[in-house]
Image (spheres, rainbow, N blue to C red):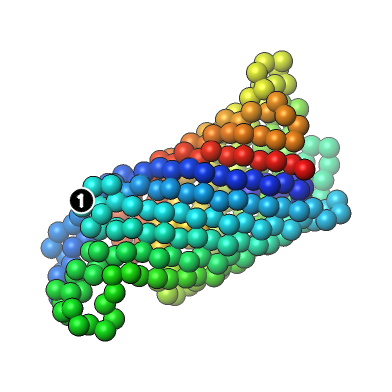
Amino acid sequence: MQAPFAISYFATRTGGGIAFDLKTPFVDSEGETIGELIGDVAFMNLGFNYQQRFGNWFAAQFGFGGIGRLGVDEQSILAQGVTGSYVLRFGGLARILQSDKVILSGGLDFARTEVVGMDLFGFAQRVIDEGLDAEDNSLVAKGNALSGRASLRVGWAPHPWLGVTGYLEGGHGDTTGGGNETLLGGGGSVGVDLKEFDLIPLGVQVVGKSDAFAQGSADLASRTYAYGFSFSYTGWDDFSIGLEMTMSKLERRNADDDFEAFIATFNLRYWP
């Protein structure tokens, strides 16, 4: 979730999950669909973000993320193979206005995505259609993309125990398979800190968001809709540790069907 606070912090994330019933059509040499492969795909991800404040209104950001995908049964291994991608991001966040309970900020960020995959199914299809000597046939497929986004981010704290954040973003980017797209997204969160009720120091947050051209899965899905929960320990002033669980609906790129994925992420964050 994109936060509106121009502060210094360092954050890491590590997680994994699974996408259910991912369908891949089997197409013959004449372009006719003669069947489909259905299987589950496992996800593994890790990354870090660093944000450095300059003055009391601006912060620069840098981030890195990596995602690996692997079929977990015979059909999904054949259809999806093994895919790895990484994303490099940099940008800035500037505070526009702030009161006792409300903050509004604007952000600008740029990203480069690299995707490398072992396309077993596509390789086999091209061998059948063109033979082993085809010049453009390769078991390993590569792609890269550049994107830029601008965002508005808001935070509202009506009570010491309650926090609400939201964001809207738009931009433009290349796809890993060629071409380019307009990027529109947004989301919000509501969080409660049980420590303020003299209970256990636990933060509970509900999150919902929609993202076009999701970094890390842009070669697979054109848009994602996600909702989830997170739990974090709030007993320290400068450090937090938490677990986020998200269920996502992904619109399949170049296809009419959707699929769902569950992802759990372990998060650490330090405020120097």
> For the C terminus, which image quadrant?
top right
**For residue 243, which quarter of the picture?**
top right
Give the SS element for disc 1. helix
| Residue name at image x 70 percent, y 41 percent | 270
Height in image: 261 above or below 178?
above
Height in image: 131 above or below 210?
below
Image location of residue 5, percent across then percent down? 74, 46
Image location of residue 92, percent across then percent down? 72, 60
Q: Is 158 on the left or on the right of 83, as rendered? A: right
- Disc 1: which residue: 74
Going by the picture, which residue comes out furthest to the top?
Answer: 198
User: Is any part of residue 96 visible from this angle?
Assistant: no
Q: Please name the amino acid that badge 1 sits on.
A: Glu
258 and 3: which one is in front? 3
| Residue name at image x 33 percent, y 69 percent | 140
How many numbered badges does the structure rendering display?
A: 1
Q: Is 130 on the left or on the right of 136, as rendered? A: left
**For residue 84, which quarter of the picture?**
bottom left
| Residue name at image x 63 percent, y 49 percent | 2
